[in-house]
Amino acid sequence: MIMSKYMDFTEVLRRVQEHISKNYAILITDDGVAESKIKLKSYIKKYIEENQLKVDGYNKSSLIERLYMEMAEFSFLTGYLERDDIEEINVNSFNDIKVTYSNGEIKPADEHFNSPTHAMDVIRRLLHQSGMILDSSQPIVVGHLSDKIRITAIAKGIVDKDVGVSVSIRIINPRKLSKEDFIRNDTASAEMLDFLTLAHRYGESICFTGATSSGKTTLMSYVLSTLPNNKRLFTIENGTREFNLIQKNDKGEVINNVIHTVTRQSDDPKQSITMAKLLETALTVNPDYICVAEMKSDEAFYAQESARSGHGVSTTIHANSCIATYYRMVTLCKQKYDMDEKTLYNLVTEAFPIIAFCKKLEDNTRHIMEITECLIKEDGSREIRTLHKYNVVDNVEVDGRSKIIGQYEMVSKPSAVMQKRLLENGISKAELSQLMGGVANE
């Protein structure tokens, strides 16, 4: 009779891997096919039962599940990747993993990799899903896992050998937030959200600006989700699709009018599909609205051209204020045409009259810090007017943690010029009154 043996998990894993690799290797490479998953788990179960293997802290079923995740999935990361309340997993080193939750909290992971080699093996498995290889010849790789998870990995040679690998895993829009969610989380006021949704609904182009993880893409996704189902929306994203704006009824029938597109990179320039190319294509399919997920290069020029041609365009950009956004756009547009900066400034301010600046504050809360309107006067001069803003009053310590105290304020109402455009684009007087805080034409 074989006595039960309590062993270290790493040793059990080594033995099981050796057994499975020798006898059933094809099951590990079947990329999660349901039948293979069942078979592999049964073989793991059989081996640990026959050899009476036990690990402290695990019952039989949890040990089988953990061994399976280590061998065919993504170790302890699998559990995090399947959750809908996590935005980012940052692997600083094999034994230092931080998790960013949807509420802004950043916490250490409960587990970590056993060694630098273990971390590298799991991350390579993640990158395999998108056909990317992380090694000494390619020590920096950007890939994806499904259309919702982006992975940036940095291997040894760029990071220290004892780190193993550093990785940023970005889980995009794990939850679709409603108006009530934004208000409950104190991300925005009801008046801000009403202004953005109504203004874009009736033709005003908007740029959502801020740093990485400031919440700008989530906010833009919400605004786009409020567009009428009979209006055609064309979205353009870079490599990985973040949006899922298609709506279906109880019968599974699509009830809105959306085209989602992504860029395609190729070693052959003729085979590459860039954001600029997709913007050109968008203009030929008669959209009511165009969404450029992010302006990072010369697509900014095409985006402002589209907005000035009468389409409602929404986009995001990295900038640290509403005013700085226009200068950032000018810089990007110059990558396409080396035009006079004043001319480009006039073009981008005409194209995007509304800027919404988002920011993640010291206590990890996200807020719309400011919404501005660019008013073009009769003499051609520009006036940047603050419509809404978030005023920070204090930063206090609560239970040993920072907490920002602030309040939202409606600073001024949209100009008469914008009101006129909105009326021409079909807004009702009741909706305009709502947008104006109860009084129109001030």
Image (cartoon, rainbow, N blue to C red):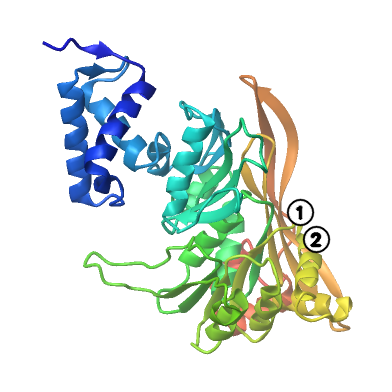
The percent coordinates of residue 426 (x first, y second) are 54, 81
Kindly identify which numbered label has been placed on residue 320: 1
* Badge 2 amino acid: Ala
Q: Is residue 335 left or right of residue 100?
A: right
The image quarter in which residue 324 lies: bottom right
The percent coordinates of residue 70 (x first, y second) are 36, 35
Q: Quadrant of the N terminus?
A: top left
In the displayed structure, 132 sits above or below 6; it is below
In the displayed structure, 139 sits above or below 362; it is below
Q: Is residue 204 left or right of residue 61?
A: right
Task: Report the front residue among 298 and 215.
Answer: 298
Disc 2 from disc 1: Cα separation: 6 Å
- Residue 174 visible? The answer is no
Task: Report the front residue among 105 and 415.
Answer: 105
* Badge 1 amino acid: Asn
Task: Report the front residue among 420 and 323.
Answer: 323
The percent coordinates of residue 148 (x first, y second) are 45, 55
Residue plotted at (43% across, 53% down) = 128
